[in-house]
């Protein structure tokens, strides 16, 4: 117990005595982890967006102008009975115009001078999740396009495919950048610990001479590295949170993508804990690397 | 207690100590004399495992120290007390904290540590300075603190490398008296020095090294 108190106190003393190098190491580690965090945050959000799009695939079927009410009702009935359809909403020309005015109040001048309402009647179809694969949506949309009276079919699947591809690139990017940045973090913390070891080389020598074992000498430095790494991880998390709030506030991105109700979200609590723990592990690894040299001496 | 058999150590192929044969019994007081570069410090370093011999065997308390692994060395050192010319005290700790370090390493309880620190400081006459930092102590006081740290674990062997080198003759005499007191309690003491006045004061066994070899081994001087 006394030894534990001693090594913890030594680790904290190390941090206090090397305040400048400690701050530099924490800041650099935080920036490094924040860069990695940006990738992970993007990955998480895109994955979430894709997931929500997949769970709520909407297909908009625009009907040709001039169809009678009976023809529109027949088409609506026919499409509603398709087994792929989970729900169907009829949007009249008037409703479409009202929606447009509501969504784009500053763009109303576009409709002025056109006289008659130019917006078509549409059927907004939500597909059942089991038919949400790219191939089946595409196949179903083509079948709908061929129905007489249908002018155009739009769906969000292309976006999903695009996002999926982006996620694959991000995954690859995160692995590569993550690897490089993690190695950089380890190197930075290793240098900091090496400086601490250099500054306290006389003390280490004295401890060795009076019979301190390797573990007793090393643990304070390992703890110091872990503390630096964890502090860097926590700071990077704060930086990411601030950046996230800024971006989502400025860009007003939530809800912009069609079919996505909550577009952006920050890391869940587990992921945040994992980032701090990741920083701690990187710090520990950095200390370990710098202590390898110390271990080579017998005396 | 200490036995050396044909021990040699080379640095850059030049012998620092060469073919040393020596036997030091339990409770002996031995002065290791010789000019600078004679191999005194190297011999002490071999004993406390800061160096490994290139040839020969060294037995300390019946253990062959030449064969100790890095992880076994600390245990041996905890049975020894080491005193250096430059004191080697931690400047950012108080005298009491410096003296307590060997006990801290072993995880001795706080109560026991306080008791032993007081005892060791009393033995070297430094009780009144226990809360001071080494920087404000005189050279003699710093050496006393170093000796207190060396004896706090009741070592079986006390090794001193020029322990009076930084002290004036009066202080040096006081420090040697301390070593004699410690030796009188049964601790084997070995001091490396080039100070001939120390030899006059000790009147014990004197081993003289010259160019890394044992030049003489005398039982005592009058």
Image (tube, helix red, strand yellow):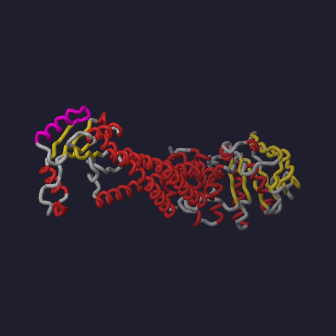
The front one of A196 and A177 is A177
Residue B53 in the image: state x and y as whole percent.
79, 48
The front one of A178 and A46 is A46
The front one of A102 and A215 is A102
Kindly report the secondary structure that dominates the magenta region of the rendered protein.
helix
Taking the image as drawn, is residue B208 in sight? Answer: no
Residue A84 lies within the magenta run: yes
Taking the image as drawn, is residue A63 in sight? Answer: yes
In the shown orientation, is residue A100 left or right of residue B171?
left
Residue lying at 35% horizontally and 55% vertically, measured from the top left: A241
In the shown orientation, is residue B102 left or right of residue B185?
left
Residue A245 in the image: state x and y as whole percent.
31, 57
Residue lying at 43% horizontally and 56% vertically, measured from the top left: A34
What's drawn in magenta, residue-wise?
A69-86
The quarter of the rendered structure image containing the N terminus of chain B is: top right
The quarter of the rendered structure image containing the C terminus of chain B is: bottom right
């Amino acid at each position: 117990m006394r030894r534990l108190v001693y090594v913890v106190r030594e680790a904290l003393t190390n941090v206090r005595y090397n305040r400048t190098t400690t701050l530099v190491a924490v800041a650099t580690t935080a920036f490094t982890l924040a860069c990695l965090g940006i990738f992970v945050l993007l990955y998480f959000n895109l994955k979430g967006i894709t997931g929500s799009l997949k769970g709520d695939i909407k297909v908009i079927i625009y009907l040709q102008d001039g169809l009678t009410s009976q023809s529109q009702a027949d088409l609506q009935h026919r499409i509603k009975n398709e087994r792929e359809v989970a729900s169907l909403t009829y949007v009249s020309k008037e409703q479409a115009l009202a929606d447009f005015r509501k969504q784009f109040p500053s763009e109303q001048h576009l409709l002025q001078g056109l006289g008659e309402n130019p917006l078509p009647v549409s059927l907004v179809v939500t597909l059942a999740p089991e038919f949400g694969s790219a191939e089946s949506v595409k196949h179903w949309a083509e079948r709908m396009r061929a129905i007489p009276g249908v002018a155009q079919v739009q769906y969000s699947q292309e976006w999903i495919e695009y996002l999926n591809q982006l996620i694959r690139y991000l995954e690859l990017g995160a692995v590569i950048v993550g690897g490089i940045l993690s190695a950089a973090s380890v190197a930075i913390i290793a240098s900091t610990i090496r400086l601490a070891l250099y500054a306290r080389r006389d003390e280490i020598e004295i401890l060795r001479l009076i019979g301190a074992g390797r573990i007793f000498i090393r643990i304070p430095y390992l703890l110091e590295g872990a503390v630096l790494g964890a502090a860097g991880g926590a700071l990077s998390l704060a930086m990411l949170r601030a950046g996230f709030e800024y971006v989502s506030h400025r860009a007003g991105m939530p809800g912009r993508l069609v079919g996505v109700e909550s577009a952006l979200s920050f890391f869940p609590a587990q992921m945040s804990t994992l980032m701090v723990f990741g920083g701690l592990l990187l710090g520990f690894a950095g200390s370990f690397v710098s202590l390898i040299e110390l271990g080579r001496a017998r005396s | 207690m200490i036995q050396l058999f044909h021990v040699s150590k080379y640095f850059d192929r030049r012998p620092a100590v060469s073919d040393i044969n020596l036997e030091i019994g339990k409770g002996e007081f031995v002065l290791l004399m010789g000019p600078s570069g004679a191999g005194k410090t190297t011999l002490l370093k071999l004993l406390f495992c800061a160096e490994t011999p290139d040839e020969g065997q060294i037995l300390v308390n019946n253990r062959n120290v030449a064969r100790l692994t890095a992880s076994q060395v600390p245990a041996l050192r905890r049975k020894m007390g080491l005193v250096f010319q430059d004191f080697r005290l931690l400047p950012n700790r108080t005298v009491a904290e410096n003296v307590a370090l060997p006990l801290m390493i072993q995880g001795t309880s706080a109560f026991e540590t306080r008791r032993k620190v007081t005892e060791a400081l009393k033995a070297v006459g430094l009780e009144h300075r226990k809360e001071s930092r080494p920087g404000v102590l005189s050279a003699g006081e710093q050496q006393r603190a170093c000796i207190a740290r060396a004896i706090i674990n009741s070592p079986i062997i006390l090794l001193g490398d020029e322990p009076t080198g930084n002290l004036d003759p009066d202080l040096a005499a006081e420090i040697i008296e301390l070593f004699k007191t410690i030796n009188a309690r049964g601790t084997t003491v070995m001091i490396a020095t080039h100070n001939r006045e120390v030899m006059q004061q000790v009147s014990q066994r004197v081993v003289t090294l010259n160019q890394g070899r044992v030049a003489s081994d005398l039982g005592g001087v009058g």
